[in-house]
Amino acid sequence: ASLGSLKEDGRQTQLSCDLNEIDIPLYFDYLPVSLPVDVTEGTANGTLQVSFSPEEEKGSKLKIQFSVTASKLTVESRNSKLNISVPTAKFEGSFEPFSQSLAIQSLLLREPSLSSDGVITRDTMANLAPLVQRPGPDDPLHQVIPSISIKLLIADGGSIVIRKKGKKEPVRIWHSLQLSIKNFTNTPTSPDRENATFRLSGEHLASSAFFTWQGQFNRQNRPSGNLQLNSMPASVVAPFLAKNSKDIKGTSDLTGLLSLSLSENKDKPFDYTLK
């Protein structure tokens, strides 16, 4: 670490710190921010710059800027039902401890793999919900969950692997996933919020199916946009159309406006509308 020189007025102090092969799980609980996930693997390299500026407005006097590359990163939901493994992840942004504000300028994920051992439950998604929408001021979690903004997120070459509980062989795999998100914030009702958009595409490993879904997040951070699904086995699509999968054969193409929200039913993670 090195202490930077003071500005001419002698009021600002800067401290720079290099990170070299830091064991992320060892220090994750000491971060000045609380997140509803656990980091079980990963090392970090990069730089931190801590600055204290008394002349800044309240909440912004202390700022931690970071540029970090994480390797062999594994993040789990608190109930260990959902995890994501990322060979390489790059983060750039800043954190203001006094205002509990985490601003990520860019988040780049190389070949992330999202996996679930069994059915993804509503409880699992509800535990992760504060990442998507920060609890209100009257909620005790408001004091520990930071406001999060992401200027740009790109996930390249990703996959989703779903397994039956207790089984090693996956029952469904989506691969070649490409995800981009712009101007996201978990405080979507903020008056200065920019239009938050997303684009997601991928391919089904066991068939020739592929899809594209792109749109925007509304004021409740519910994603909604145009879905184009091509060459999908009709038996997979049938349940979403209130049909018996045994009565339908062949492949199907599907287009429409798909919207998702957290389900009120404890037996399923999402509610959806498709028009």
Image (spheres, rainbow, N blue to C red):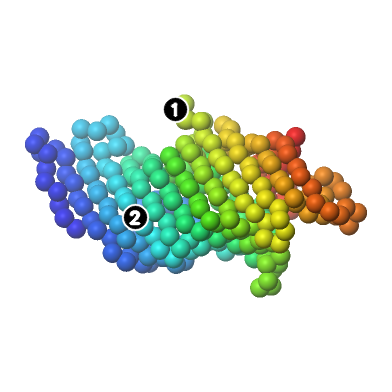
Quarter where residue 106 is shown = top left
Q: Is residue 103 visible?
A: yes
Task: Select label 2 or label 1 by which is in front.
Answer: 2
- The amino acid on which the numbered mark 1 sits, given as a three-letter code, is Asp
The front one of 225 and 59 is 225
**Position in image of residue 149 (x %, y %):** 44, 40
Q: Is residue 130 visible?
A: no
Residue at 36%, 39% in the rendered image: 99
Q: Secondary structure at mark 2?
A: strand
Q: Is residue 228 left or right of residue 61?
A: right
Q: Is residue 128 left or right of residue 69?
A: right
Q: Is residue 64 left or right of residue 237?
A: left
**Position in image of residue 260 (x %, y %):** 66, 41
Residue at 47%, 46% in the rendered image: 153
Quarter where residue 222 is shown = top right
Q: Which residue is mark 1?
A: 192
